[in-house]
Amino acid sequence: MAETEKITIYAMGKAYKVPAGLTIMSALEYAGYQYIRGCGCRSGYCGGCATIYRREGDYKLYTDLACQTPAEDGMYLVQLPFVPANKSIYDLDKIEPMETTLVEHYPEIVKCVSCNTCTKACPQDLDVMYFIQAAKIGDFKEVAELSFDCIQCGLCAVRCPADIAHYHVAQLARRIYGKFINEKVEQLTKRLNEIEKGVYDKELNKLMKMNKAMLEKAYKKRKIEGTK
Amino acid sequence: MEIAYYPGCTLRTSAKNFESSSIAVADHLGITFKELSQWNCCGTVYSLASDDLMKHLAPVRVLIRAQEDNKENGLDNKLVTLCSMCYNTVKMANHLVKNDEEKLDTINQFMDEEPDYEADVNVLHFLQLLDEIGIDRIKENTKKSLEVLNLACYYGCYLLRPEEASIDEEPEAPSIMERIMEAAGARTIDYPFKNECCGSYLTVTEKKYTAERTYKIISSVVNRGADAIVLSCPLCAFNLDRRQKQAKELHANMKSIPIFYFPQLLGLAFGINSNELGFNMHYVDPRPLLKEKRLIKR
Amino acid sequence: MIEMIDGYPKYMRESIKKVEETRQDRVDKLPKPMSMSERKKILNKFHPDFDPKGKRKVRTGPNKGDIVPNEVADLLEAYPSIAPKDIDLSNIDYDVDVLVIGGGMAGTVAALWALKEGIKKDKILITTKLRHGDSNSIKAQGGIQCADREEDSPAMHYLDVIGGGHFANKPELARALVTDAPKILDWHEDLGVMYDRDNGKYLELSGGGTSRFRLHSAKDYTGLEIMRVLRDESINQGIEVIEFASAIELLLDDGGKVAGALLYNMETEEYSIARAKSTILATGGFGRLHIQSYPTTNHYGATADGLVMAYRAGANFVDMDTVQYHPTGAAYPEQIVGQLITEKVRGLGGQPVNKDGKQFVFPLEPRDVEAAAIIRECTERNKGVKSPTGMVGIWLDTPIIEIIHGKGAVKENLHAIYRMYERFDIDVTKDPILVFPTLHYQNGGVEIDVNAATSVAGLFAAGEVEGGVHGKNRLMGNSLLDCNVFGLRAGISAAKHAKKTKLGKLTLQHVEKYTKNLEKNKIKPKMRSPMLLPEYREEDVLARRLRLST
Ligand SMILES: Cc1cc2nc3c(=O)[nH]c(=O)nc-3n(C[C@H](O)[C@H](O)[C@H](O)COP(=O)(O)OP(=O)(O)OC[C@H]3O[C@@H](n4cnc5c(N)ncnc54)[C@H](O)[C@@H]3O)c2cc1C
C-alpha cells in the first residue's frame, strides 16, 4: 500500500503527525490520546466533543465537533468537554407561558447585542441569535423550531459576550412549546382509556397462549400497511 | 405604498396596541408596513449603557436586513419604526456609520456573515412618514373629528435628542405631533414639559422618582385643560400611565388622565374599529373618556 | 490525488449516473418482500450473525454452555480488573435507596420513576461512565413505536414484536412493551417532548418489520429530543448524577442480595463505594466490542460492562446468541464509516439499489434480512460499489424521497443525515449515499421479569442491557420504547424493593468466587473486564507505552 499522506495537527499546541483523512477525534486517538472526556456518541448527537480550533495563518477561532470534522494540516486544537453555564431550575407544571416567561428565567437574554457570535459558533449551523431574539419576545414556536437540532454542546454560551446560555433558554422554550402549545393528540388519549379498560386483553391473552406454529401463521397473515 | 418596517421588541410585548393601531392607521392610508423578514432587538439596552462599537452591531444588523429586504422587494431604501427608543437607536447608529467610514468598515468586517452595510437606508419614524404623506391626507380620511378632545402631545427624549435624530426641525419646540393630531381635528395645548424626560429606566430602580415626574407632567397638562396625553414611546407610556398609581399614592389630589399612542386616536378619527386600537391595554382606562366624548359607543 | 466531484470521486459518479437513470421508474415499483423460507435461506448464508465461527459456548457462570459472540465470551472469561482484597468496603461513600448505573435513557427514566414512587431525591443516585446523556439513547434518530392509531392496536404491535424476534421473546415482556406504550408517550407529552405532528395528529411512519405506520419521531433527532428533556427534568428534580464514574463491580450483601456498586472515577482513578438497597442496571449495549470486526453505530461507552458485572453477581442472560446489524451504516466517506443511516430513510421511501442502479430487496424487510440482502449484493453477486479506501457498499437512494414527498422533504425529516453529509460536500437531496451493514444492537441481555427484576434479589435492569423483550431481533423504534417501559418499571420496582429491604454486610466474595471458577473451568483469560473504554490508539504508540512505577 502506498504511504498515506501525513498532516501535522497541534493538540493544545503540541505537534503530532497523523494520516490525512481522519476526523479530529480519530486523529487525536491516532496520536496516542485515549479519551475519557471529550468523546461521547462519536456521531454528532451528544455535543460531548466540542472543539475550538484555529488554522495556521488565520487569526480567527473556529468551533466544531471533533467527531464530525475532518482534521486539516496546521490545525491548532483544544477541546471543551464541559461548559459551566447556568441552568434555571423550574417546575414545568407550574409555568404559565407568557411573553416574559423566558426573560424571567433567563434575564440575561435582554443583554444580547446581536453580535451573532453564537450563530457563528454553532456546529449545527443553527440561527442561534435569532432564537434568542425570539425568546426575548416570548415566541416559543420560533425558538422551538429554530433551536430544534440543538445538541447542547454549549459552544454558543462560551463565545457569547453577554454570557447567555442559549441552549438552556431553548430547552425551556421547547418544553413549554411541547407541553402547552402542542395539543394532546386525541387518538392517544383514546387508546390509553381503551387499554385501561382492558379492551385488548382478550386478544393479547389469546396471542400469548399461541404456540410457535400458530404465531407464525398469524404473523404471515398480517396485512402490511402501505403495500399492495 | 409599501415600506419596510421594523417593529422592535416592546411592540410585541407591552406595547402591542401601539403596533396594532399604527398598522391599522397606516393601512387606512394605503401604507403597508412590510415587516423585515428577520429582525433582532435594536440594541437599545447597550446603547444606553456604554459606548463601544459592539452596541452598534444590533442596529446595523437591522439596517442590513432592511437594505437587503428592500433590494429583494424592490422598495425605496427606507425603514419605518414606531417605538421611539428603536427609532433613536437605529437612527443614531445609521448616522454614526454614515459619517464614519472607518467605523462602518470595522462593523462590516466583524459581521462577515452579512452583506456589507452600504449606509444608504433612510430611517423614519411613523410621525415623519405621516407628515411626509401630508396633513391633507389625514384630513381627508378623518370621518369623526377629534375636536372634542384637548390633547397634550408628549415627545420625551428619543424623538428629539440628539439633534441628528430629531423628527422635528425644532427639537426645542417641536410641533410635528400637534400638526398631525390637529389635522384629525383635535385641539392641542402647549406646556413646558413636552420634551422633558419621563424618568426612563429609573422606573426600575427609583419608582418614586419617576412617580414624581409623572405627577409633575400630568398636573401640568391637566392644569392647562388637557383631557389626555398622546405620545409615541412605550417607555414614556409605561411611566406616564402605570406610574400614575404611585403618583397618586404620593399626591392624593392628582387627577388621572389616559395616555394614548398617537395612532390610537388617529384610528378613532378614521373610523377604524376600536377593537383594533387596543384601548383595553391601559392602566388608566381611556374608555370612560372616549365614551363621554362620544368617540366610542357607550 | 483522486478527482472529486461534489463529494464523490469521479469513478463513483459513473455508478451514481445509473442510479439517476432508473430513479423515476422505481418511484412506485418495489421488489416483493421475501417469504419465510427465502428469509431463512439468505440469513443462513449471508448474515454475519449466522456464521458459527463468530460465536462460541461460554465456559463459566450462570449461562455456562450457552452460545454467545466470541467477543462477549472473552469478556465473561476474563479476570476482574480489581482484586477484592484491595477494596475497603467499610467506608461507604454514597448510601442510597436506589442506585442507577448508566445515565442513558433507561437509567434516567428509572430514576425519575423511583422519585415518583416516593424515594427522596437525595436517596437516588445516578452514576455514569461519560456525561449524563452521552449514550446510545441520544443517537436514536428514527423514532419510537406506539400503536395509537385507529387502524392499529397493541395486539398488532405485539405480533410484529414477536415475529420480528423470531418468536423467541418472553411473551409477558413483549406484552408489557406494547401496552405501556401509550402511557409513555402521554408522559413524554406532559414533560414537553415535541413529537412530529401533522394537522393535530401524530405523523407516523412505518419501520422495517412493522405492519402499521406507528413510528413516532421528533425529526431525525428522536433520541436527542427525549433524552435532553429527561435530563433537564432530572436536573430540575435535583437527582444527583456522578459523571465519569463507572461501576466496575456490583456489591452483594452477606445475604446474597445486590447492595450497590464499586465505582471508579475515570479521571482520578479513585474508587468509591455506593451502597444501595436497590440497584438498577442501565448500562446499555455492546457495539464498541466491534463484534466480528464490524464498525458500529454505538456510542463510545457501549462496552458491555453491565453484562460482565451482572454475570459475576450471578444474574443470567437470555438471547445473547444473536447480534443486530443495522442494514445501513455509512460506507463512505471514510471519516463516518459505520455511523447510522436511520431506517427512517427507507421509511420515507429511500431505496437500496446496486451499482447498476437496480433494486434487489424490498426496502423494509426486518433488519437482519435487509442486512443479509445487502451483504449478498456486495459479495456473492458482486454488485457493490467500492470506496477509495476499499469499503464496499450499495447505494441508498435518498433523492427519490423528494420525488415521493416533494421538494424539501429530506431536509425537513432527515436534517441530521443532511447535515452529516454536508460536512463532506455531499448533498443527499441530489446524490445517493453508500451504505453497508453496521453493528447496531444487543438483542439479548440480562434476563428480567415484567417488573424489570433480574434473577438476583436487589438487582433490576432496563434498556439495552436486558434481554427477553425483543427475542432474537429487535425492531426499529421498540428500543426507545423498551428503555422507557422497563425504565419506568425498574424505577417503581426498585423503589418498592428499597422500602422493605435491610442490607447486611457488604462483600465482593462473588468476584473472588468467579475468579476461582475460571481456574476450575480451566479457562486462561486473555484480558481483564469490564472494558470501560475501547482502544483506538495507534499500535505503535501502545507498543512504546510505559507505565512508570513509583
Ligand atoms: C445510532 C443509533 C440509532 C438508534 N435509533 C433508534 C431508533 O430510532 N429507535 C429505537 O427505538 N432505538 C434506536 N436505537 C437503539 C436505542 O437508542 C438504544 O438501544 C437505547 O437507547 C439504549 O438505551 P439504554 O438507556 O439502555 O442505553 P444507553 O442509552 O446506551 O445508556 C447507557 C449508559 O450507561 C453508561 N454506562 C455504560 N457502562 C457503564 C458503567 N460501567 N458504569 C456506569 N455507566 C455506564 C453509558 O455510558 C451510557 O450513558 C438506536 C441506537 C443507535 C446506536
Image (cartoon, coloured by chain):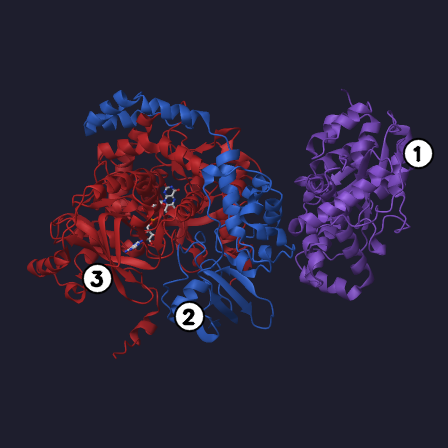
Chain colours: A blue, B purple, C red
| Label 2: few (<14), some (14–19) or many (≥20) C-alpha neighbours in 10 Å | few
In the image, the residue with mark 2 has its CB under 8 Å from the nearest atom of ligand 1: no
Question: Residue A196: percent from the left, percent from the top?
Answer: 32, 24
Task: Check disc 2 and give the amino acid type.
Answer: Ala
Q: Which residue is mark 3?
A: C91
Corner quadrant of residue C302: bottom left
Query: Could you tell whether C262 is left or right of B209 in the image?
Result: left
Chain bearing tag 1 is B
Q: Which residue is mark 1?
A: B136
Residue C340, placed above or below residue C486: below
Q: Which residue does the image show at 75% across and 56% down from the upper left?
A: B117
Q: CA distance from mark 2 to mark 3?
A: 58 Å
Task: Check disc 3 and give the amino acid type.
Answer: Asn
Chain bearing tag 2 is A
Chain bearing tag 3 is C
Callout 1 and callout 3 share a chain: no
Foreground pick, B164 / C385: B164
Q: Which residue does the image show at 41% across and 52% down from the upper left?
A: C339
Query: Could you tell whether B70 is left or right of C168 in the image?
Result: right
Residue B227, placed above or below residue B126: above
Q: Which residue is mark 2?
A: A2
Q: Nearer the viewer, mark 1 or mark 3?
A: 3
Question: Residue A115: percent from the left, percent from the top?
Answer: 65, 57
If the image is split into quadrants, where does the C terminus of chain C sit? bottom left
Q: Nearer the viewer, mark 1 or mark 2?
A: 1
Query: Could you tell whether B108 is left or right of C66 in the image?
Result: right
Q: Is residue A60 visible?
A: yes
Q: Is residue C341 visible?
A: no
Element marked by disc 1? helix
Q: Nearer the viewer, mark 2 or mark 3?
A: 3
